[in-house]
Amino acid sequence: MTYLGEDCSADCLKRWGLFATSLGIGDLKRWCALIALSGEKQKPDELTRHILMRARMCELLAENNTNMTKQGGFMLGIFAGLDALLDTPRDQILNQVMLSEEIKRAILYGEGIYGELLTTVDNLMMCKWNELSPRYSERVLNEAYQSSIIWVRETLLRMA
């Protein structure tokens, strides 16, 4: 079995992208958690937790916004961190998977409503309080953060 981080060709990324988009969001979450836990022993566990936490927070915050989807939010969070997990350039990954241009531009350039979401989540996780978007209240951000911590912990325990 070849892991994506090992000689991840364009064909490999296309197959992975087709596979990922064919799954439902629940299955994709479980699959991502499994890959993160089983495939990348050379990566710190904290990187896995960070990627899953970002994805869950993006999902929760997008769910409450009529201009976004929770699936789009989760994919945004996952794909924004795959470059670090797979040691593959972000633009190479995004050019090979079927994601909306809106989400790709959000990940690459921080543009649009999804870009604002990703920037807000990243700023929250890095404790950059003065750089949080006013679109989200302190209460909403805190609830998403706390819920994400619990979800990641439970997900990782189920996969252990």
Image (spheres, rainbow, N blue to C red):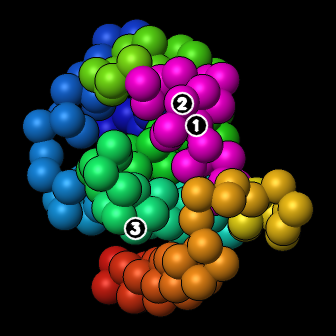
Label 1 crowding class (10 Å Cα cut-off): few <14, some 14-19, many 20+? Answer: many
Q: Are marks 2 and 3 in contact (CB under 8 Å)?
A: no
Return the disc, 3 or 1, that comes first in the chain's sequence: 3
**Local secondary structure at mark 1:** helix
Visible in this render: residue 37? no
Q: Which residue is disc 3 drawn over?
A: 60
Residue 63 forms part of the magenta stretch: no
Q: Is residue 112 magenta?
A: yes
* Residue bounds of the magenta highlight: 102-122
In which quadrant of the rendered view does residue 42 lie?
bottom right
Q: Amino acid at mark 3?
A: Leu
**On the rendered structure, is 21 left or right of 88?**
left
Residue 91 visible in the picture: yes
Q: Nearer the viewer, residue 127 or 7?
A: 127
Crowd tier of the residue under label 3, counting other residues whose Cα lies within 10 Å: few below 14, some 14–19, many 20 or above: many
Q: Residue at x 20, y 55 (%)?
A: 25
Q: Amino acid at mark 1?
A: Gly
In the image, 44 versus 143, the foreground residue is 143
> On residue 115, which mark appears?
1
* Percent position of residue 61, x then y: 45, 63
Residue type at tag 2: Gly
> In screen coordinates, is 27 left or right of 140?
left
Residue at the spot x=73%, y=66% of the render?
Answer: 125
Q: Residues within 10 Å of mark 2 (few under 14, many from 20)?
A: some
Residue 71 in picture, x, y percent from top left: 27, 50
What quarter of the picture does the C terminus occupy? bottom left
- In the rendered image, the quadrant that contains the N terminus is top left
Q: Is residue 76 left or right of residue 127?
A: left
Which residue is tagged 2? 112
